[in-house]
Image (tube, rainbow, N blue to C red):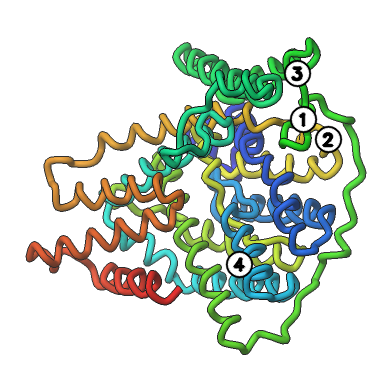
Amino acid sequence: MEKFFKLKEHGTDVRTEVIAGITTFMTMAYILAVNPNILGATGMDSGAVFTATALASALASFAMAILANMPFVLSAGMGLNAYFTYTVVMGMGYSWQTALTAVFFEGLIFIVLSVTNVREAIFNAIPVPLKIAVSVGIGLFIAFIGLQNAHIVVDGATLVTMFSFKGSLAAGTFQSEGITVLLAMIGILITAILVLKNIKGNILIGILVTWLLGILCQLFGLYVPNPEAGFYSLIPSGIVSAPAPIAPTLLQLDFSNVFSLNFLVVIFAFLFVDIFDTLGTLIGCASKAGLLDKDGKLPGIRGALLADAIGTTAGACLGTSTITTFVESSSGIAEGGRTGLTAVVAGALFVLALFFSPIFLAIPSFATAPALIIVGFFMMQQVAKIDWSDMLTAIPAFICIGAMAFMYSISEGIAFGIISYTLLHLIMGEGKKVTTLMYILTVIFILKYFLL
């Protein structure tokens, strides 16, 4: 492993990488429950989608380790799976087989773009201040996800608001929802204390301790599961289970609509969101891991992008939506993961999940939420690297950070960051400092908002 992953060169060891891989998997295991639920609304077999998601995630993560030796883990992208179901199938009226075909073509195009360095060129064209801003923005974004997953932040008259314990007690929902919010808050404190004490594996320990506290609450009757409201038993229903057959979704592609204009629009939408979500995640996570060189470039990025593209293509053949690099990879990086061994461990756990699904599906979102919030803190530390005295670059960086968090999208954050960076430089007479590719990206982004 030392020879293949170059552990010493990256300042890590097997134990650190294993803990990092487990941590990353724990923070993103929810996708195994969520993706079948979302894609199942199209008429797809949920069991087959579960198997396809686990296999595609493992395959893509192994590819990341082999082709790039980086600690990034991949799975079916949130947002992209919703677009697959609610826009392409339920909105536009395409069959799920046709939607899978669009994902398949997207993956093939990605492979071409990765091999021909187009995606690498886009990555390198983004200015360093914006790359730092992407990392910071992802920190806010992932912390916001954690707060929502824990129900600490909920819908309200002000768009979002804090969960009301008083309201929960009055409504009689404290023993289902309220107690989990309280446990999440306790989990944040526990994880923060572990971080402050510099205990190895602090984030993973935080997840497990929070989950254990939840189990104890259930055993003593403080937590009462309410499946209809989305609050399930925290105690695994079993240990071992047979993988669901993948036949209902395997190679179920429909090429009959390939040459229609709408089909091309669907492919472009998948392509656009995935390109910039992936680039944003790679920028943010690589920056946190210290993998970027002095020019802000990521050595070996071609392999990382190719692994992402291979995962998407294989995922479509297996029967799942677009596979992409997960922002939760930052949780493993925060644990010290620096090589592909982290991705291998997480990929192996996706395979194990096929046979031990009752355990992995019992991991509650309130237990992983503290990890996401603390990781958000770690990524926010990058904000100190932005030169706030240089307002010409600092303002676009701020716009990028804000858009990413408040628009709930990595790709929108990048889009607004690039547009504002280019236009402000042009208006202030500094247009020569902007590369040709940045101008092209700015035009594409602006057209996207009017045409899609």
As drawn, the residue found furthest toward the left would be 429
- Residue 215's disc is 3
Say which residue appears at 49% left-offset and 63% top-offset. Answer: 273
Q: Nearer the viewer, residue 254 or 341?
A: 254
Say which residue appears at 53% left-offset and 56% top-offset. Answer: 304
Which numbered disc, 3 or 2, marks the residue that appears first in the sequence? Answer: 3
Amino acid at dot 2: Pro
- The spot of residue 350 in percent (x, y) is 74, 44
Q: Nearer the viewer, mark 3 or mark 2?
A: 3
**Could you tell me if residue 205 is visible in this image?**
no
> Could you give the CA–CA distance between mark 3 and mark 4, rounded to whole angstroms?
38 Å
Amino acid at dot 3: Ile
> Could you give the CA–CA distance between mark 1 and mark 4, rounded to whole angstroms?
30 Å
Which numbered disc, 3 or 4, marks the residue that appears first in the sequence? Answer: 4
Q: Nearer the viewer, mark 2 or mark 4?
A: 4
- The spot of residue 388 in percent (x, y) is 17, 40
Which numbered disc, 2 or 4, marks the residue that appears first in the sequence? Answer: 4
Label 3 packing within 10 angstroms: few (<14), some (14-19), many (20+): some
- The residue beneath circle 1 is 226
- The spot of residue 132 in percent (x, y) is 32, 45
